[in-house]
Image (cartoon, rainbow, N blue to C red):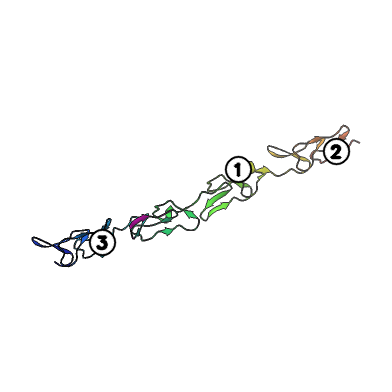
Amino acid sequence: CSAGDYMTDSGCQQCGENAFSGDGASSCTSCPDGKLSAAGSTSEDDCEYAPCSAGDYMTDSGCQQCGENAFSGDGASSCTSCPDGKLSAAGSTSEDDCEYAPCSAGDYMNDSGCQQCGENAFSDDGASSCISCQDGKLSAAGSTSEDDCEYAPCSAGDYMNDSGCQQCGENAFSDDGASSCISCQDGKLSAAADSGCQQCG
């Protein structure tokens, strides 16, 4: 019999799928485990692993799963790394599975990755945008909570309360950054928003 066939009592018969034979064979040899071949294959070289499914890649010992931060499509012989800074689970099947790690508090996610929140805004862990401080409140860049938003220190003649800077009333005064006003001593007066008291008369 010619290669690809084998001898039986009734003559030469073709080897079935996943087996092969050389010239003059009396039987067919099975392909190694996991390898496949068409009927009538003539050598072990005809035995090949089935194409790998997406998320796997072909090695000498068969299909292996792509590791973390890489992906593959159907029939791949290697895995493709995710773009710089992006991560994926093992066995990922496309670049769409590659994503940036969630941002930490004080940052937010955009198409380029994590970016720091600017001044007068803040963010929590995993944010896709920053939240502005309430009107009149300020914060440093990279602030992580609303508690970081504070009113700017008041100027002399004003004082700070929960609503921001308020003007001291008559016969009271304050210095820069005050949280309360100080009453004038007996015999001294001041106009509203003054930074000191004047002697009467």
Q: Earlier in the sequence, mark 1 or mark 3?
A: 3
Name the residue: 61% across, 51% down.
118
Residue 39 placed where, x, y %?
A: 19, 61
Q: State which region is magenta.
A: 60-67
Tell me the residue that label 2 is attached to.
197
Q: Is residue 45 left or right of residue 140?
A: left
Picture layout, residue 26 above or below residue 97: below
To which quarter of the image does residue 182 belong?
top right
As shown in the figure, which amino acid type bears the numbered disc 1? Ser
The label on residue 47 is: 3
Label 1 crowd bin: few (<14), some (14–19), many (20+), radius 10 Å: some
Label 3 crowd bin: few (<14), some (14–19), many (20+), radius 10 Å: many
Observer-side mark, 3 or 2, equals 3
Tell me the residue that label 1 is attached to.
145
Q: Earlier in the sequence, mark 3 or mark 2?
A: 3
- Name, please, the residue furthest toward the left: 10
